[in-house]
Image (cartoon, rainbow, N blue to C red):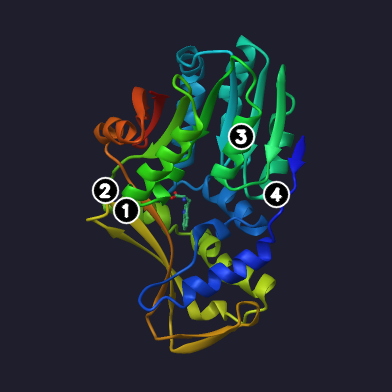
Amino acid sequence: MLVHAIPTNVTYDFALDVRAGLTQPDQKELPSKYLYDDVGSALFEVISHLPEYGLTRADERLLRRHASEIVDRVAGPVSVAELGSGSGRKTRYLLEAFCRRQRTSYYPVEISHSALVMCERELSDIESISIVGFEREYLDGLLEVAAYRKPGHHLCVLFLGSTIGNFDRTAGIRFLSDVRNILKPGDSLLLGTDLEKPHSQLIRAYDDELGVTAAFNLNLLARANRELGSDFDLSKFVHTAKVNPEARSVEMHLESTCRQTVDIPASEIKVEFAAGETIWTESSHKYSADEIDGIARRAGFRCEVQWIDEQWPFAENLLIAE
Ligand code: TRP
């Protein structure tokens, strides 16, 4: 696999984003994309196996069960781009179905180098596949993929695992519109959305008994210590997950258990934390199955079909660019 090099300096961006996020006057925040370094990607892989976190398995079940039906609904010939491929495990079923129909190019777009490498290892044995990975942010990567479009080929974009839920609703629609603007009419977007479920189930999913999700979230501070030379004392922060009923989301925070000051040399800041003060790291918005078509239409798509898992409320939505 050809993994394209990133021209930007990731550590420098991280230092700047940490500075911007931790000097906010009200709620301190850190962008969730930095959760996925090598350690974070490995921890997320473990989260996806936890009994409390049914999301990834629901996604995988739907893709396994409905792969041929999904492929039948996507006009060919087609090239497949995936935004945030992760290990690529659940994408196998779809790619096998696409490749049974005809030779297919697969372009995973992923900011985690180790996830890209894993993804290639996992999928390269599929017959009639060619894989070109892009170590890029989603839209930058998709723009490059679109520039590779072969004449007469459709693009099918995969945005699985409910990553859309990590945007708030308005930003989510804006992101889908940005994707739509890179596509042509008749191209498709397979969108995974986690559906609303009881609050107690959501809290367990995002604050598991073993503490893997806590380790995943705290790794953001450990990463800052490794890469930015900061002195976060991880024993003085705890992971919290709370439901925000108005936003219909679960919010993840790192809460300072005491009053403390943290020095972050690469960001050229010293940050004061009050006891109980939090850093907001991620929100995961939940949807109702009925609202997806409206969202799709506002972004220039229509929702053609929806497949919903019976065990864990989760929907795979096939959107077609209008
Ligand atoms: N973004 C994913 C989700 O919303 C990944 C995730 C799972 C996550 N658990 C988390 C992100 C805890 C931050 C903190 O499901």
* SS at mark 1 in the image: strand
Please tell me whether mark 3 or mark 4 is closer to you in this view.
4
Identity of the amino acid at label 3? Answer: Arg
In front here: 309 or 151?
A: 151
Please tell me whether mark 4 or mark 2 is closer to you in this view.
4
Gap between marks 4 and 2, in whole Å?
Answer: 35 Å
Please tell me whether mark 2 or mark 3 is closer to you in this view.
3
How many residues crowd mark 3 within 10 Å: few (<14), some (14–19), many (20+)? few
Residue to which mark 4 is pinned: 113
* SS at mark 4 in the image: helix
Q: Which numbered disc flags the more N-terminal residue, 1 or 3? A: 3
Identity of the amino acid at label 4? Answer: His
Relative image position of residue 110 (x, y in whole percent): 62, 44
Gap between marks 3 and 4, in whole Å?
Answer: 16 Å
Identity of the amino acid at label 1? Answer: Ser
Residue to which mark 3 is pinned: 89
Gap between marks 2 and 1, in whole Å?
Answer: 12 Å
- Image quarter hosting the N terminus: top right
Gap between marks 2 and 3, in whole Å?
Answer: 28 Å
Residue to which mark 2 is pinned: 198
Residue to which mark 1 is pinned: 249
Q: Which numbered disc flags the more N-terminal residue, 3 or 4? A: 3
The reply to whether discs 3 and 4 touch (Cβ–Cβ < 8 Å) is no
Q: Which numbered disc flags the more N-terminal residue, 4 or 2? A: 4
How many residues crowd mark 2 within 10 Å: few (<14), some (14–19), many (20+)? few
Within the image, what quadrant is residue 146 found in?
A: top right
The reply to whether discs 4 and 2 touch (Cβ–Cβ < 8 Å) is no
Identity of the amino acid at label 2? Answer: Pro
